[in-house]
Amino acid sequence: MRSIDRAWVNKKINELKIHPSRENGQNFLVSSEPLEKIIAAGDVREGDRVLEIGPGLGALTESLLHAGAHVTAIEFDPKLVQYLEKNIPKKFPHEILHGDALAIARPEFLKVMQPYKLIANIPYHLTSEIVRHFVESAHSPTTICLLIQKEVAERLIAKPPRTNQLALFTQWFASVEYIATVSRQNFIPAPEVDSAIVRLIPGAGAAARHNVTPAEQKNLFSLIKRGFSSPRKQLRNNLSPINTTTNFDFTRRAETLTHEEWINLLRALS
């Protein structure tokens, strides 16, 4: 497996005449240490089926392949697709797909992939969309291990009394663990913030501990969305008008409620 460093990445970017795009979230890793941590956090083993989004120059792709995984990588940039098709050794089981990852990873595609893991250094601007797409899928991965913006990682693991809408949604469907911080100096170009590795286990979230019908689940997230419409305001303002005789304390803010309290509130308001 080739060594990854700043000189090698700069050389490849120049050879390919790539101008890293902030719009496409292109920040290339220049250190092997984060790759090793991602592989360990994803518990990648011989024979694992892995879906990778945004492989870039293939640093993580090759690490996954050398760990014994069969990798399906989805890349949006056509120059990088051509590079990967030419340079990823043919002896390893892999596919390089060109296109929008969320458009490709539809239910029928993911059903064929199962069982699989999602392991990727994803574009920062797509983090929330990617997390939501995969944790609530009927064909979700067994493990999700992502390198994302540190601030978003901290939001994902947040708990009451400082939780948020993204955390409540994600933790409903999956357990979430903050694995490690990755300095911005490990990337070209260096982003404005540090990154973090997170691990999610779909099916191990709050939903598994609560008996909630599909209709209730839909209404639950509608209620949570209303509750966070003005996060610093009290629930009596965000949920107004309130027609209920419940003893619930509506002077509380949405960020202080647990999943169980949201469920109880939903049922009290029904």
Image (cartoon, rainbow, N blue to C red):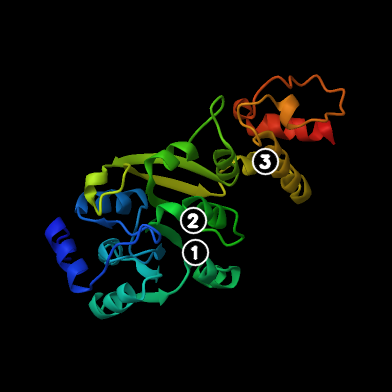
Q: Is residue 49 above or below residue 221?
A: below
Q: Is residue 257 above or below residue 112?
A: above
Judge the density around disc 2: few (<14), some (14-19), many (≥20) Cα neighbours within 10 Å. Answer: some
Judge the density around disc 1: few (<14), some (14-19), many (≥20) Cα neighbours within 10 Å. Answer: some
Q: Which mark is residue 125?
A: none
**Quadrant in the rendering for residue 64:** bottom left
Among all residues in the image, which is located at the extreme left?
A: 7
Separation of marks 1 and 2 at Cα, in angstroms: 7 Å
Q: Are marks 1 and 2 in contact (CB under 8 Å)?
A: yes
Separation of marks 3 and 2 at Cα, in angstroms: 27 Å
Q: Are marks 3 and 2 in contact (CB under 8 Å)?
A: no
N-terminal label among 3 and 2 = 2
N-terminal label among 1 and 2 = 1
- Total marks drawn? 3
- Secondary structure, mark 3, is helix
Q: Where is the N terminus found, in terms of image quarters? A: bottom left
Q: Indicate the position of residue 80 as horizontal and vertical percent values.
A: 31, 72
Q: Which mark is residue 142?
A: 2
Q: Indicate the position of residue 168 as horizontal and vertical percent values.
A: 59, 39
Q: Residue at x 29, y 61 (%)?
A: 60
Q: Residue at x 50, y 69 (%)?
A: 113
Mark 1 highlights which residue?
A: 115
Mark 3 highlights which residue?
A: 225
Judge the density around disc 3: few (<14), some (14-19), many (≥20) Cα neighbours within 10 Å. Answer: some
- Secondary structure, mark 1, is loop
Separation of marks 1 and 3 at Cα, in angstroms: 32 Å
- Secondary structure, mark 2, is loop
Horizontally, is 249 left or right of 103 in the view? right
Question: What residue type is disc 2 on?
Answer: Thr
Q: Indicate the position of residue 198 as horizontal and vertical percent values.
A: 40, 45
